[in-house]
Amino acid sequence: MGIIYDRVMYGSETVKDPLYFNENSYGKLHIKESCTGCGNCIEECLVNAISKEKGNITIDSKKCIYCGNCIDACELGALENSHNYKMADIEEAGDKLKEKIYKKFKRSLVLRSVDSGSCNACMLELSAMSNNYYSLSRFGIDFAASPRHSDGIVVTGPVTINMKEALIKTYNAVPDPKIVIAAGACAHDGGVFKESYGTINLLSEILPVDLTIPGCPPSPQAMIYGMLKLLDRV
């Protein structure tokens, strides 16, 4: 009864367009023309996401944890946060997947989340997608408890040695054809835990990744955008 009363009192709590530009969200880092390539940002990067190629600074958005250390270290202010959360990338496996099964997933998508060793930040944002504000289910995307009832899996956190077997078993339990989504920098290449004892750096070395959603953690907006992009809805 309390839920019904809240709806009558406050009306709909669901945001009409979850993909609105959010100036409070972090996004892809932008390198200005004033950059001299001094390399201070490279020294400050915790996850080796910044490199120098042919005298120019480049940033790997998938590896970046968006801590802001590089921005603070740049004396010229040549780095800035674009607030553009639309950073999800469809991998080569995802392109092949779309060619084969686009019609199958066009109307709905059911996913099983797998925490392979995260700090739980990505899982919290993943859960937030299903709350009243973002209401992921209105797009035909939902989560299931069993991989056998799912179209794919969403992996969060670095793959720990102890979770590798469980992850593979969960993936194998999903009926073919299936989707693999790497949510967050840790799922991509280990993030801040890369090269540490007990973790496997690259998820793509274990499973064929179809979609990578950068961030530490990625916002609900970023994850919704990535999933809709994979389904050709944005």
Image: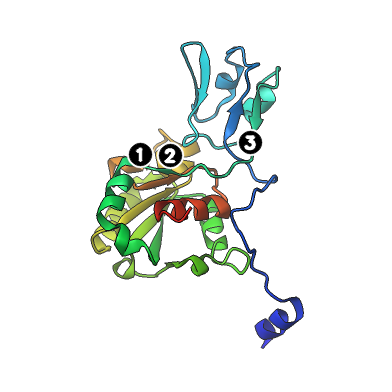
Which is more toward the observer, 150 or 18?
18
Residue beneath the point at 39% across and 51% down: 181
In the image, residue 168 lies at what x, y percent? 27, 54
Choose mark 1 or mark 3, whichever is in front.
Answer: 3
Which scheme is used to colour this image of the protein?
rainbow
Residue 32, relative to residue 194: is it above or below?
Answer: above
| Residue at image mark 1 | 202
> Is residue 77 something that shows in the picture?
yes
Q: Quadrant of residue 32?
A: top right
**SS class of the residue under badge 2?**
loop
In the image, residue 133 lies at what x, y percent? 63, 65
Q: In 3D space, how far apart are the residues under numbered discs 1 and 2 (Cα atoms)?
A: 7 Å
Residue beneath the point at 55% across and 47% down: 217
**Mark 2 Cα within 10 Å, few/some/many (few <14, many 20+)?**
many
Residue 1, relative to residue 58: is it above or below?
Answer: below
**Mark 1 Cα within 10 Å, few/some/many (few <14, many 20+)?**
some
| Residue at image mark 2 | 190
Using the image, tell me which numbered label, if any, was put on residue 50: none
Residue beneath the point at 55% across and 58% down: 124
Q: Please state, as top left, top right, bottom left or bottom right, where the N terminus lies in the image.
A: bottom right
Q: In 3D space, how far apart are the residues under numbered discs 1 and 3 (Cα atoms)?
A: 27 Å
Using the image, tell me which numbered label, if any, was put on residue 82: 3
Q: Earlier in the sequence, mark 1 or mark 3?
A: 3
**SS class of the residue under badge 3?**
loop
Q: Earlier in the sequence, mark 1 or mark 2?
A: 2
Q: What is the three-letter code of the residue carrying label 1?
A: Leu
Q: In 3D space, how far apart are the residues under numbered discs 3 and 2 (Cα atoms)?
A: 24 Å
In the image, residue 77 lies at what x, y percent? 70, 22
